[in-house]
Amino acid sequence: MQVKGRLWNLFFLFSPEIFRLHLKEMSFEYFKYKGVNFSPGSYSEEALSFAENEFEVLDDDVYIVTYPKSGTNWMIEILSLLRTKGDPTWCNSLPIWLRSPWYETIEGQSQIKDVVTPRVLTSHLPCHIFAKSFFTSEAKIIYVMRNPKDILVSLFHFSKMLSLYKYPKSFAEFFEDFLQGNVLYNSWFDHVKGWMQMKQNSNFFFITYEELYKDLHKSVIKICEFLGKDLDDSQIDLVIKHSSFNAMKENKMSNYSLIPQDFMDQTKGSFMRKGIAGDWKNHFTVAQNEYFDAVYKEQMKELKMTFFWEQL
Ligand code: PPS
């Protein structure tokens, strides 16, 4: 009964936005908050200012922070399963966005009051506008990164489905917009460079989608170490089993099939699309790849870090 009540609550939360905006049918402009692009559908100046300046971070909070399409929901599923020691009942009965709401969104801020503690919350915010209270707290961040070439491809497809994104005119045009940061949440390069300033902090842990993809077992053990979780081998096996791409694609609480079509139109694609590393090779031309590499090299030179995908 409680789950049903929450689902109605969800639809109620989405409906006013849908009826007011019909974003895919209307042209809209991103608005800027401190130089970052946001969409009028789920964000407002007030909600973002609240997230940055007033939101109260609790010492036992864990934040999953990502640039969009980096593996955010995969990490939510993993942490949900770690909470229940591999038992999938919770993941199979409560929508993923209610288990771990995006704390900067209008909907997320309404949903947070029902989140069980210790809270796992989600955010795509860049570091410079993240909740100020985090930086004086003992809360933890898990930052998930992904090969930006695969993010570009994933986001291109997702932009056709989610009303918060401008509908991409063509892959070529979207390619340029992505590299220039003319997308929701701005540039991938700035997001990563901003958050990597935290990499030495003991309450900050980063991992890549590619590491999860290559060796989920090893990755889950690393996550457990960071969070101080003690699961036995059979419990870890359950976490891996229930957070697999196929398990999540089948789980209606995790595959976003419960979201109204006006908001996320899965007739135009699938949220759980391919779930692989390297799909960019099926999309980029040789010239686009060379151009991407040149921009990447220039943008990332100051960071002096080598990422997993650069060695693949
Ligand atoms: S969002 O909308 O920004 O929150 O999206 P996000 O969850 O960050 O990323 C969605 C992509 O992650 C893939 N995904 C997975 N891959 C492998 N295994 C699992 N379990 C998994 N769950 C989600 C999802 O398919 C999207 O990637 P693409 O490349 O589009 O398939």
Image (spheres, grey):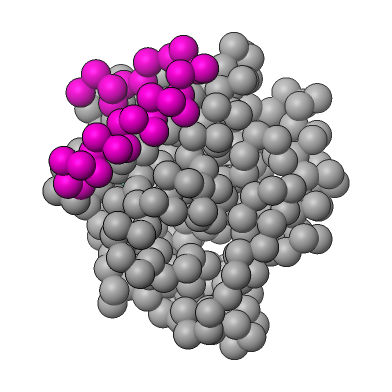
Along the viewing direction, whichever of 277 and 108 lies nearer the viewer: 277
- The quarter of the picture where the N terminus appears is bottom right
> Going by the picture, which residue comes out furthest to the right?
54
Residue 184 in the image: x percent, y percent? 54, 55
Q: Is 172 left, or right, of 205 in this rendering?
A: left
The image quadrant of residue 250 is bottom left
Along the viewing direction, whichever of 252 and 150 lies nearer the viewer: 150
Magenta span: 284-312
- What residue is at 48 percent from the left and 65 percent from the top? 165
Q: Is residue 305 magenta?
A: yes
Vertical placement of 309 versus 130: above or below?
Answer: above
- What residue is at 74 percent from the left and 48 percent from the top? 34
Dominant secondary structure (helix, strand or loop) of the stretch shown in magenta: helix
Vertical placement of 170 versus 99: above or below?
Answer: below
- What residue is at 35 percent from the left and 52 percent from the top? 175
> Going by the picture, which residue comes out furthest to the bottom?
19
- What residue is at 20 percent from the left and 42 percent from the top? 287
Q: Is 263 left, or right, of 127 in this rendering?
A: left
Along the viewing direction, whichever of 147 and 91 lies nearer the viewer: 147
Residue 182 in the image: x percent, y percent? 51, 53
Q: Is residue 229 visible?
A: no
Q: Is residue 97 visible?
A: yes
Q: Is residue 210 magenta?
A: no
Vertical placement of 151 versus 260: above or below?
Answer: above
Residue 81 in the image: x percent, y percent? 42, 40
Residue 135 in the image: x percent, y percent? 76, 27
